[in-house]
Amino acid sequence: MRKITILFLCLQVCIICLHAQTVDTSLLKKRLTDYLQNNFQEKLYVHTDKNTYLAGEIIWFKIYNTEAYTNRPVNISKVAYIELLDNQNKPILQTKVTLKEGGGEGTLYLPVSINSGSYVLRTYTSWMKNFGADYYYHKDLSVYNTLKEENFNEEKKVDDNIYRVHFFPEGGNLVDGLTSRIAFRAVDRRGKSVEFEGVILNHNNDTISKFSPLKFGIGSFYFCPYKAEKYKVLIKPKGGNEFSTTLPPIFEKGTVISIKRKDPAYLSVLLQSNLVQPDEKYTLLVHSGQKIVCVKTISKEDTGKEYPVAVSLLGDGISHFTLFSSKGTAICQRLYFKKPANLLNIRTETDKQDYVPKEKVQLNIHAGLPVKTNYSISVYQTDSDINEEESIISSLWLSSELKGKIENVAWYLKDPTGDATDNLMLTHGWRRFKWENIFGQEPPSINYPPELEGHIISGRMYNSLTGDAVENGQAYLSIPGQHGQFYTSSSHKGGKINFFTRNFYSGNEIIVQTDARTDSLLQVAIYSPFSDEFSAWYPAQFNEQPSQKGLLERSIAMQVNNAFQARQLNNQKLTSQPSFSFYHQPDKVYKLDDYVRFTTMEEVLREYVTEISVSLRKKNYYLRVLDNKVGQFGERAPLILLDGVPLFDDGNAIIKTDPIKIQRLELIPTAYTYGKNSFSGIASFYSYKGDLAGYQLPATALVLDYESLQTNREFYSPMYEGDHTGFSRSPDYRTTLLWSGTNVTDARGQATMSFFTSEVKGKYVVDIQSITADGKLGTASTTFNVTGKEPIKIN
């Protein structure tokens, strides 16, 4: 496992300079290399079975977890958090999914009460919360509720005729008298791109420049600004009213950088400056991912000259050009995108184009290389052409690396000239790190530990009288049940406390306690594991007028399918999730059904649990455990657990428990250390129902509804071949024919799959997303038709 370390650089920026006018390039390269190699970051991609759903359907998804700079699958975080957000960023659905070997699967059931509209599916890990919500994965989904009446005309409408145009000078700033390339992006109030015509006027209302978008409301133009001039920008949107705006501020002194691709093999880098220092020297650093491409020192006399950078030296994806002043300050930054060449050329084809209902489909998959590749696949009905708005390639190479939402991101991978993609680099800034972090001025704040083994339940310990945070206090968390779990933890700075759970797959309740015998004022508040930070991602515009006939047919199909296949649709995969006990294996287990049943727990313990001594003093019971190692009973009571819940007394509570409700007793008859706690032994009782056998928790105990990690649901895909049970005569109105999240090609890069069509006629899409162990990405899609019988009739 790769070791995660966070690089806190304690040196100051000033030591980058050997003297006042020269940057120590070797130290600069070392700082960046150390940071990139040690500051681990993740990014996620989520493949859903489709993008449009009905209320009452299930969202099936596969999560791909990769290292941010290489796209290689990583096995660091073990939990991913999934949320479905409405247009107010309110979570409608939330769940937690296990990650293993760089991936995880799960489902979300869309309740019949959900409103029609555009929603955002967002996904992240606990570790990703340290770097902000812009790093989370976001995806637009549409939901239609055909089971209730909705009047969209009564809803508050967004005024689409409110526009914004943002300007982005290449390198960062406009400087007096220096020609700069200015990129721009125009959007409406929903964030959708806007086509327009724009002009720049001087103080005499003379037209200085005209400009318009090249693609998706984004474009660029060259402009030489003068600080003494007053400029006005007029924007005339297509189909909208003209409005005015302003350019970014113009600085009197400064430096600008320009990058052009004049030749297919080289980029031309031009540096301009109007600073007066004759001995000023600049340093240009170029890096792609974790690789430093080049570092070049440029003197003041050499500004205005073009410097070539070979495109072949750049890595696939985004390269980062940064210009430093002689003081070691990053003064200009520029991104350049090189189309990834090292992709999987996945091909997929069905054994024929047209099928009849309930016919077998044979699907062949070829990775294009003799390599094993992990892939997920969905086959679903569609009323439109194949949706190419996003894939694992466009997500991991582009949208996950840039700020903000990118309209039709997959198109840029097919940009014939690269001009539109270059405009995209100018309008969406880099976000993987800040130079201040690298130079140690702003050490990264790490508030969320990586979940290396399982889900971490976090909270805050405080004094119940004063509300002040308490450090070094002990708390105990239980997940009650027939395989109850028990965890301990101590609070640290600010009262923060973390419980490191494992195999948390059952139970929807947690109990948190402190031991009132040592401090009766301690209390613990538990935080939600879901992020309360949100990015500027906006849901896509909702199509309020889809094909009514298509929606109605699909709705009837869903209702019929849910009625006839309800049991199959709710099947859980038979994957064994091992129960977890902190003491692993007990030294001895007493199954009470193997012995004579007594009516009191005191009789049970006295008669056949020889390792426990029961004594009664002043109407209080005291239990002691025989330590096998020293041959005598301990001086203190053991840790007594009931369904994983600690009983903080010496024996009264367990003695009062009805033994008829207890299934077994597990014993550790020796001293045991767990965390910062030392116990004289452990006596762990388990009830038949996992319901604490009637034990009443103390009033100070915190009991919370808390959802466990999701267990996998089994996708229902009937097989009709050789069916002699009559099952093939059952109605089959599935519109998603196949979903399989975890699949692997053979060493030749090939795989075959088969499934059966349903009785729903129409066009079906096969959608495949894929990744190899070394980060090669691939996607493929094809279509086929189901014909031959009459479709579902609408009366």
Image: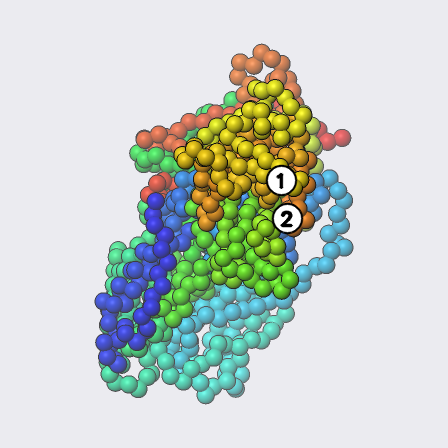
Q: Amino acid at mark 2?
A: Ala
Q: Position of residue 469 (x, y in %)?
A: 56, 62
Q: Nearer the viewer, residue 313 or 714?
A: 714
**Residue 665, quarter of the rendered image:** top right
Q: Residue furthest front?
A: 618
- Type of amino acid at the residue the image marks with label 1: Arg
Q: Closest to the observer: 319 or 450?
A: 450
In percent of width and height, residue 667 lies at 50, 32
State which quadrant residue 292 falls in: bottom left
Q: Is residue 677 above or below residue 335?
A: above
Instruction: State the residue at coordinates (28%, 77%).
Output: 326
Query: In the figure, is residue 395 to the left or right of 665?
Result: left
Q: Residue at x 36, y 55 (%)?
A: 5
User: Disc 1 on helix, strand or loop?
Assistant: strand
Secondary element at tag 2: loop
Q: Which residue is mark 2?
A: 701
Front-lying residue, 760 or 617: 617
> Farthest bottom residue?
228
Task: Please tell me how crowded label 1 is: few (under 14), some (14-19), or many (20+) other residues with Cα within 10 Å.
Answer: few
Tag of residue 715: none
* Residue at numbered disc 1: 617
